Amino acid sequence: MRVTHVITRLIVGGAQENTIATVLGLQAKADLQVDLISGPTSGPEGSLEATLHPGSICLRRVRNDQLAEGDDAPAGGRCSPLLTIIPELVRPIRPWLDCRALQKLTKIFHETKPDIVHTHSGKAGILGRLAARRAGVPIILHTIHGPSFGSFQNSFANFIFRSAEKYAAQCTTHFISVADAMTKDYLAAGIGSPKKYTRIFSGFSLEPFLTASNDLSFRKELGIEPEDFVVGKIARLFELKGHDDLFVIAPQLVRRFPQTKFLLVGDGLWRNRFELRACALGLEKNFIFTGLISPNEVPRHVGIMNALVHLSRREGLPRALPQALAAARPVITYDCDGANEVCIPNETGFLVRPGDKEDLTEKIIRLINDPTLCKRLGGAGQAMVKNNFSVEQMVETIFSLYVKLTAQSATEKGRYVS
């Protein structure tokens, strides 16, 4: 069986980590050839291409209309899995480039003849599925990592993206959603039918988080004292991620609890803006900016947090939430999309209505004042995540779905022939 995954870009992010973990996990299966196609990766969000270990993956780039082996390709032929970069597969809407990307995807699928095409993210999800249908790929899957339409954008943009998703759904054999919330939103928009959806949580390597510790030497390195209460946030420094709300409530929190520190993990286009804001508030010592870190450094940073907040207005199921819970750290999150499927009120953390800064402040204060509560919520969260979010469980469930859909396709083809 040959499976080709398609994603728009391999920046440091949850959807990208999910995709790479899936590709590498599936490649270990006998008689399964797994390839990955991506657009170019650039910008302050960083790149995950390096996490695809040399020797375990081969890189090639599409130059003009030819598939050219890259510098990482071993002598003597291609290796497996294969990463193909299509320069025209970019995130913004660019009609000319989009048409070129569609043509190149279709050509690749015609040449490689995958049994399954599995797409991820918005642009690659649309173009990848259309190209797979044009090339006659028998099984086409799409993973919904986050919503492409919703209250976070204007009505015209929602009309465009909803229409595109409806059109692409006609080419889709099955959907995987990382949270039930995604399934509900897409069904409410008239995209697909209930039987075409399967929820599969976005798994990750649990052990580094299960063993994460409050490393006092690492705290000192970052300017954090042993007695400081660290409110962590893991997200790109960009719009819709909720950092502004944290800056609004920070002054009153620090006035009441001077030993409060805010650990912002990640980088992005708005970093300079937030650094200037921290200085303007006189809180430059209370806000710690880590900058871009690799995924394998995340557990170390989570380990020195006392709690994690997630204030994004647009997510599927925020990867930071189960990661913090795996480290037995309580979470506070805006009640958006799939957050309430891991943040169970008063059991693993607290849900806050989006934008309710007063309630957000009150929930943080509760945790600051009650270490026993922190321990109880974190412990319950850790047990829940251990049972649902291992990368091995994710890969096995996806593989089982592939096998099921392949069998169904063969049965339907047999009926048609007979």
Image (cartoon, grey):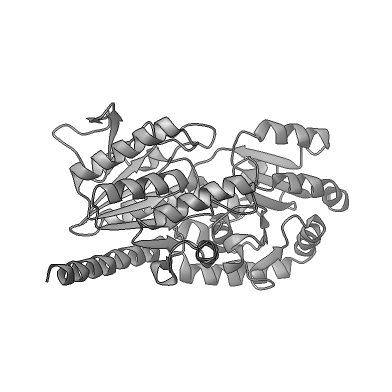
- Location of residue 285 (image quadrant): top right
Q: Can residue 217 be seen in the rendering of this structure?
A: no
Residue 321 screen position, x and y as percent: 58, 59
Q: Can residue 66 be seen in the rendering of this structure?
A: yes
Q: Quadrant of the C terminus?
A: bottom left
Residue 19 screen position, x and y as percent: 39, 51
Q: Is residue 417 left or right of residue 59?
A: left
Q: Between 259 and 6, which is closer to the camera in this rendering?
A: 6
Residue 309 screen position, x and y as percent: 67, 55
Which residue is found at the position 54% from the left and 57% from the top? 316
Q: Is residue 49 left or right of residue 112?
A: right
Q: Quadrant of the N terminus?
A: bottom left
Relative to 72, residue 13 above or below: below
Residue 97 screen position, x and y as percent: 40, 31
Q: How many marks?
A: 0
Relative to 303, residue 271 above or below: above
- Location of residue 413 (image quadrant): bottom left
Q: Between 91 and 269, which is closer to the camera in this rendering?
A: 91
Q: Is residue 56 left or right of residue 330?
A: left
